[in-house]
Image (cartoon, rainbow, N blue to C red):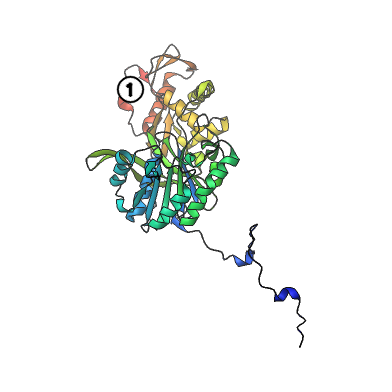
Amino acid sequence: MKDHSPVWEALPPPMELDGIVLTRGSDIEPVPISWLWHHWLARGKLHILAGAPGAGKTTIALGLAATLTSGGRWPDGVRCEPGNVLIWSGEDDPADTLVPRLIGMGANMDRIYFVTGSRVDDEVLPFDPARELLELSIEAQRIGDIKLLIVDPVVSAVSGDSHKNAEVRKGLQPLVNLGAELGAAVVGITHLSKGTVGRDPTERVTGSIAFSAVARIVMLAAKVRNEEGGDKRMLVRAKANIAPDDGGFEYHVEQVEARGIPTSIVTWGQAVAGNARDLLAEPEEEGTDAAGARQSAEDFLRELLICATPTKTVQAEAKEAGHSWSTVRRASDALNVLKKKGESGWYWQLPVYARKGGNLLTKKHGQVGQHEHVEQDKTAHVAQGAQLAHVLKGEEAEQLGDEEVPL
C-alpha cells in the first residue's frame, strides 16, 4: 500500500542550528526563590551592599560569610545551613585584615576560599574579575557547595565605563550568570556617591544607576543619629524586586582580638521598620546650601522649642516647614538641644539660657542670641522650666546656675 503521508513527516528531525532559542511558557516549571537568608540573600541573584566610608560594609559582608560557613544565625535569629564562600577583594589584604575579621566572627575557615590570583604560564598574576569569570566558575564548581560569592568592589567586574548604563549591564551580566550557575548569592560591595544626600537611596550608589537596576536587592549600611545624640548603625533594604523593600537591622562594629591580632567584627541589634529614606539620616553637611539649610532649621527650632516638645511633634512640624530630618538633627546639635525620655516618650527643648537685657545667652557659647527676644516675664519662664522638670523628672535641675532660668 502506498504511503501518502507528507514528505516532511518522514524526514529526520532538523539539526539544532545557531540562532535564537525560544522556550514555550508552558514548558517552564515555576519554582520559588531559594533563600539563604529569607528576603535578604537569594541564591543565584546579584545583591549590592553600599555604604559610606567607615560604615563597615565589608565587615558586614564578612559577618554574613562567617554566619553561613559556621551554620550560625542570621540577624533575625533564624539558623542557616552551612555552605562554602568565595571572596574576591581588591581593597583589603586577606592575611592582615579579612582573615582576622572572619576568625573574630567565628567563621569556619575551611569553608572560606579567597581568589588570590590567576596562574598564566607558571606565573601568578592579579585576578581580573572582568575577564576571568569563566575560569573562576570552573574552580568554584570543582570546590562545590558555593553558596555566597563576595566581590569587593563590584565595580571591578566592569571593564568599561562604570558610569555608562550599557557598559555596566554588560560587565555585570557574567557575574549574574556565575551566581546562577553556582546557585550562589552574589554580594557586590560599593560606595555611596558624594553630594547625594537626600536623594533616593538607590540613586546614591556610586557609578551608573545600572548597578542598582541589575541587582535584585540593594542594601545600604549607614551611621545615623539616635535620640541620645550618639551614632547608630543600620543595615536597610533600599530596593528589592523579589522581597519587601523596607526594614532593616541595627548593627555595631566592635574591636576585638583574633589570635592576638586587633580586628573589627559586626554584632547585630534589633530589627527596625520603615523605608530606607526615612530610616537613614546622613550626618553630612555639604557646601553653602547645607549651611543655609541648617541655619534655617536652627531658626525653626528656636521658635518651636520654647517648652518641652514631643519628638514626634518636632518631626511633623519640620516636615510641614520643609526641613529634612537630617538637617534638623544637625541644627539641634548646634543649638545643644536637650533630648530626654519622659513618661510618654522622647522630648526636645532648647538648652538652659541666661536672661540679660531681654536677650538670651546660650550656656554653651555665651553669646547673645540673634534670633530670639524674650517677651514673656520671668514668671512664665519659671513655669516652663517647671514643666520641663516635670517631664524629664528633674534630671536637668542640677545644671541650673544662680542667674539662669529655663525656657
| 155 relative to 96 in the view: left or right | right
Dot 1: within a 10 Å radius of its alpha carbon, few (fewer than 14), some, or many (20 or more) residues? some
Front position in the image: 228 or 204: 204
Front position in the image: 194 or 312: 194
Front position in the image: 14 or 326: 14
Spot occupied by residue 9 in the image (x, y as percentages of width and height): 71, 75
| 263 relative to 380 in the view: left or right | left
On the image, which quarter does residue 322 sit in? top right
Spot occupied by residue 319 in the image (x, y as percentages of width and height): 55, 33
Spot occupied by residue 286 in the image (x, y as percentages of width and height): 50, 25
Identify the residue at the far top of this view. 357
Q: From this viewpoint, is residue 391 visible?
A: no
Q: Locate the N terminus by quadrant.
A: bottom right
Front position in the image: 225 or 43: 43
Above-or-below relation of 340 to 22: above
Q: Locate the C terminus by quadrant.
A: top left
Q: Amino acid at mark 1?
A: Leu
Spot occupied by residue 208 in the image (x, y as percentages of width and height): 56, 37
Q: How many marks?
A: 1
Q: From this viewpoint, is residue 24 visible?
A: yes
Q: Which residue is mark 1?
A: 400
- Element on which disc 1 rests: loop
Identify the residue at the far front of this view. 121
| 271 relative to 106 in the view: left or right | right
Identify the residue at the far bottom of this view. 1
